[in-house]
Amino acid sequence: MKRRIVFLITELDPGGAERALYELVVRLPPDAYEVAVASLTDEGEAAGWFRREGIEVWSVGMRGMADVRALFRLKREIERRRPHLLHSFLFHANLAGRVAGRMAGVPLILSSVRVEETRWSHLLLDGLTHRLADLEACVSESARRYTAARARVPPEKLVVVPNGVSLARFAEVAPAPAEWGLGDAGLVVAWVGRFDAQKDPLLFLRAAHAVLRRGLNARFVMAGEGPLRRRVEAEARRLGHAERIRLLGRVPDAAPLLKRCSFLVLTSRWEGMPNVVLEAMACSRPVIATAVGGCPEMIRDGVTGCLVRRSCEGTLVERMAGLLGDPGRAAEMGRVARRFVEQHYTIEQTVAAWKAVYDKLFAWRRVRG
């Protein structure tokens, strides 16, 4: 008998969690699994990824957690599909999925912890509702420890399933589009993410300015959108060097930028296990990242990249200047980073880990009766 799984995610705008969900769902063997994907809010661009693969996608249209009617719509849609397992991604989907899933009588509920949540209200709600889920899968060992300590989820209810990347996806990447203006840019430093407080794009901007003041010839390119976009633009104008700092906005695929850059910089204040780090490493590029969340699990300091303390601008500037001043060292670190991903973080390993979690849940369900 096929195992019916409904995957519930907060939204389907392109991002790391949406990409991770897509890479998982399309690799589940159709002779063993019957799957559907639901967006808690409205559909986004990523919904098309699934539909092109023949996967059912639907949206709930929830307008905040106080939208009780949407919660009942979710319950009815779940009941109609009668899944054996409800697997949710991201905080709001976890919360709604636990409540609606239990109301709908879903036999098994699996939540996914993809970030080390800092908001006390989210930690409180996670702690209050974790009993409605059978298991929570954390994206890194760091996230597992954090969730157990801060959300007070029993350790026996937590497992680790790290992200993985499709190496085939990065085997042949098209050159960066001409409108990005990187053809003759020389050395390029990339930053990819959402322009918000978590990702701290202003720290990258200040560090780029400090590096340029040292006379190093490089182009700094930021890809992403978010609520801090206007502040970043204003700060870039204030600092100067407008010709050396380029904001691309949201890009459909960051792979051409990752292939073109000398290295990636991640300035996050908190994380789970950012996909973009693995993607850069899969492109044979080293990563300079703040030592938060699962970053120390992916990056071997001084070998596949560099780790700096959170918000430590001085050290970040030194590491960026060091790699720009020694392209040969950066290239060698990138080659080692690629081999590290091949050994530990392929999408095939991740899918196998998810299937093992599903097997564990279904076996436990049989024993439970």
Image (cartoon, helix red, strand yellow):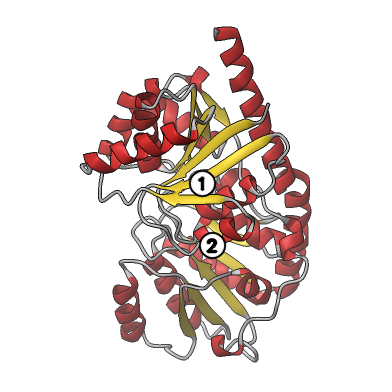
Q: Secondary structure at mark 2?
A: helix
Is 35 left or right of 241, judged from the image as shown?
Answer: right
Q: Amino acid at mark 2?
A: Gly
What residue do we see at 43% from left, 88% from top?
Answer: 241
Q: Where is residue 168 drawn, in percent x and y?
A: 76, 60
Q: Residues within 10 Å of mark 1 (few under 14, many from 20)?
A: many
Residue found at x 69% / y 73%: 326
Q: Which residue is mark 1?
A: 37
Characterize the local packing of mark 2: few (<14), some (14-19) or many (20 or more) Cα atoms within 10 angstroms: some
Decide which of tag 2 and tag 1 comes sooner along the chain: 1
Picture quadrant where residue 106 is located: top left
Residue 331 can be seen, yes or no: yes
| Horizontal side, residue 21 vs residue 132: left or right | right
Quarter assignment of residue 332: bottom right
Residue 215 lies, with reference to residue 253, above or below; the image says below
Instruction: Estimate the x, y position of residue 345 in percent, counting from the top left.
Output: 70, 46
**Quadrant where the N terminus is found in the figure:** top right
Q: Which residue was labeled with disc 2?
A: 48
Closest to the observer, 217 or 139:
139
Assign the C terminus to one quadrant of the image.
top right
Position in image of residue 67 (x %, y %): 22, 44
Residue 46's label in the rendered image is none
Q: Position of residue 281 (x, y in %)?
A: 68, 59
Residue type of the residue flagged with mark 1: Val
